[in-house]
Image (tube, grey):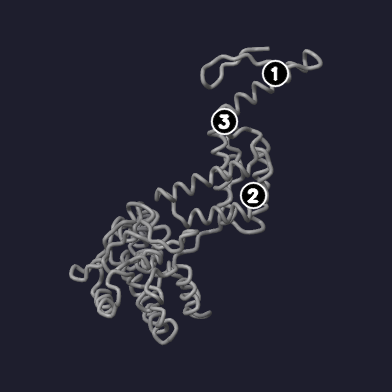
Amino acid sequence: MTKYRDFDGVTRPVERSGKTKAAAERELKQALTSRTTSQGGSISPNTKFRDVAEQWFVSILAAVDHGTRSPTTADVYRSHLDRHVLPALAELRVREVTVPRVDAFLVTLRQNTGTATAKTARTIVSNVLGLAVRHGALGANPTRETTRIEGGRRKTPRALTLEERQLWLAQLEADEVASRKDLPDLSRFMLATGVRIGEALAACWPDLDLTAGTVAVNFTVARRKGKGLIRKSTKTSAGERTLPLPSWAVDMLRRRYYLAEDKDGPIFPDSIGGLRDPSNTLRDLRNARGSEGFAWVTSHVFRKTAATILDEAGLTPRLVADQLGHSRPSLTQDVYMARKTVSRDAATALEAAFAKESN
């Protein structure tokens, strides 16, 4: 028997028995270890991974309700939990979720499904085990010691050239289905603003000031399980912005406004006047682009194109980032700005490298 000071500060006797003195000491040490690691809360080393995962996911849903997490993120986490993480780890006790086990799971998952899925699964496992650490069930998070999941080389952003922009709009306008689904004007709006597809579909007429020629971008459209399509605030405070519009975009929007039946509804509504589903709209764009000349075009290409046009016009990275709703200009430069041909000035400067020696 020994005395142990519990988490509440009270010292209590702890006693274990065994067939021999050595056996009794081993039982006592194990009891003390278990008491130390399980005193943090309802999660203990013997709690199953599945139960910890469900507790963690409840916190994600609560964050969605408070507006600090996106419903889309919650749906992605739930899908990856059910399809990949739980089938591999659900029945393990927390103490059994070791570095080798997590590492083997992630390596296999990457081989079978790809880097993106493995990275998301790693995030989920890390968050679940982080909860276990905070409850005192683990001394450290095993996920941190797993092999780093390296992605492939990032593709250089490609923007539409002036000729391609003209051809793209001509192709859409010649397509009866694409025109009926508002794809020409939607493309123009996204090229004029650089907004994300969800932000474009969330824009409503009260957000538009035709006199000032501006549009307020404060919301995005997302699908929430059990509630359908919702209009939720943008990702960050940097995402809330008021954008000036070029005159050709104002003319297009003014024409649409006069024809709109609901002056308080979405600028680009669905067939019955409500919010339009971003996933369905992306599918419409895929169908309209065809399988040849514009097969590479996605909704993000309009965003990259807008960023590249602003960059080539001499705007600072900070101003371009503000337009796109980024808090960090470096993200805008790395992801959304197409690389330009290096200025000839660089070669001119380097001419001097051996100039003196050749004289």
Residue 106 versus residue 41 in the image, above or below? below
Earlier in the chain: of badge 1 and badge 2, it is 1
SS for callout 2: helix
Q: Which residue is mark 2?
A: 86
Residue with the most extreme left position: 211
| Residue 111 numbered mark, or none | none
Residues at marks 1 and 3, CA–CA distance in whole angstroms:
19 Å
**At label 2, which amino acid type do we have?**
Leu
Relative to 210, 103 lies left or right: right
Badge 1 crowding class, 10 Å Cα cut-off, few under 14, some 14 to 19, many 20 or more, is some
Q: Residue at x 43, y 61 (%)?
A: 222
**At label 1, which amino acid type do we have?**
Leu
Residue with the most extreme front position: 226
SS for callout 3: loop
Q: Position of residue 187 (x, y in %)?
A: 37, 74
Earlier in the chain: of badge 2 and badge 3, it is 2
Q: Residue at x 38, y 66 (%)?
A: 303
Q: Position of residue 307 (x, y in %)?
A: 35, 64
Q: Position of residue 2 (x, y in %)?
A: 65, 12
Q: Which residue is mark 3?
A: 136
| Residue 28 numbered mark, or none | 1
Earlier in the chain: of badge 1 and badge 3, it is 1
Q: Are marks 2 and 3 in contact (CB under 8 Å)?
A: no
Q: Nearer the viewer, residue 123 or 91?
A: 91
Q: Quadrant of the N terminus?
A: top right
Q: Are marks 1 and 3 in contact (CB under 8 Å)?
A: no
Residues at marks 2 and 3, CA–CA distance in whole angstroms:
22 Å
